[in-house]
Amino acid sequence: MTAALGKSSPTEGALPSPLDFVLEALAEAGALAERDDARAVALLPARLAAEIEVPEECALALYPDRDGDVACGLGSTLLERLIARARGRPVSTSVRLAADPPRPAHVRAAADRFVLRNGLCEPGQVSTGTAVYVAAVVAYGVEADDRREGLVRIVVNAHDGGEPDAALGAHLDLAWPSALVLPSAAPLSVDGRAADWIALRAEQAVRAAVRLLLGEVERRHARDHDRIVAYFADLIAEARAPRRRADPKAVEAKVAHLIAERNAKLEALPARFAAKVTCSVAALVSAEVPAALVSLRLRRRKESRDLVVRLPAGASSLDRLLCEACGAATARPAACDDRLHLLCEACAPNAQGRIACPACAKRR
């Protein structure tokens, strides 16, 4: 759209002007627009015009100086509605990481560092291949007496729920594109459970991210509560010790009125400071990444289990494994005695003795 209007493309990473953004957003929704310097004339589909509440044929201007022009500058209603509309639709794309697989010596060293907290592990064959990861950007908001927003990013393996280290995640952060990330020719295959793994990790990440914000809400609530109590305490003290002689009944009536007003204000505080947390997926990136696979034999008491661990290109450590009880990621799993389910530190905090396995309990 920008090229069609005869404007040079913005510098990479720079924000477009409000008018450029509005025209591109309208064009993506099926509108036609013709620009003339700081103004533009647009013809909108009827459904779009009704959704954003502007005429089907309208003139747009950053700062309108003619009757009938629709404002689209910073702070304008149209710009806010188009931003909200764009944010309501998650963006998705498929890419591939153009990097060499990890070196065999690096892979073997990483496999030797793998620890089963309550058993033995024996590294076996090393092979190379590719792995598919999904990076999800989740937007969250905390709304109470004010509104705060933020983003968290979740990266999981699309087929087993493993979680790579931050080095690989940095390559998949498309807000700061990596030269190694190239478009993929076709959509990548993803396990149907990937959405569940992303939702679980996103919930954990959002809980951690909003903990500080919720603490700030509680402090503001306590501050306003104390201010109201102190303010009315002073008023009640003044009412009970008037400078001039007053009728005791009038004094008590005034005190009762102040107490009722104070209580009403205190009762209104919880609703004002009741925090509402919302989150939604803003973007999804599926990525094909070269990886090395290592087969492991896990041993616990008389039982054994074969496992494959993965070291993707660009990572310095093995993917953290999926806890088979709660779905969290763990780098130091423990194994239960009956089926050798892999358990995280939260599900098996003590790896000594016989573990009460939550995964086995679910099966039963």
Image (cartoon, rainbow, N blue to C red):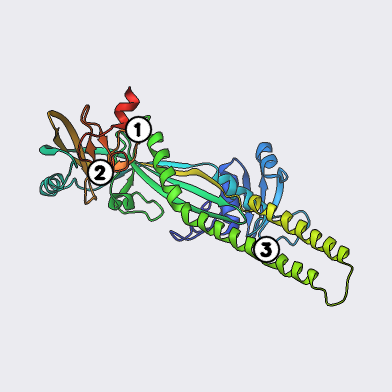
Question: Mark 3 sits on what residue?
Answer: 229
Q: Earlier in the sequence, mark 2 or mark 3?
A: 3
Q: Earlier in the sequence, mark 1 or mark 2?
A: 1
**Residue ID at (82%, 74%):** 242
Q: Nearer the viewer, residue 282 or 233?
A: 233
Determine contact: label 1, label 2, CB under 8 Å: no
Would residue 264 appear left or right of 212 to someone viewing this image? Answer: right
Q: Is residue 122 above or below residue 80?
A: above
**What SS does tag 1 mark?**
loop
**Residue ID at (35%, 32%):** 190
Determine contact: label 2, label 3, CB under 8 Å: no
Estimate the x, y position of residue 218 in percent, counting from the top left: 55, 56
Question: Mark 1 sits on what residue?
Answer: 190
Q: CA distance from mark 2 to mark 3?
A: 54 Å
Q: Amino acid at mark 2?
A: Asp
Q: Nearer the viewer, mark 2 or mark 3?
A: 3
Quadrant of res 221: bottom right
Estimate the x, y position of residue 127 in percent, counting from the top left: 14, 37
Within 10 Å of the Cα at label 1, are there few (<14), some (14-19), or many (20+) other Cα atoms?
Answer: some
Q: Amino acid at mark 1?
A: Val
**Residue ID at (63%, 63%):** 226
Estimate the x, y position of residue 146 in percent, counting from the top left: 61, 57
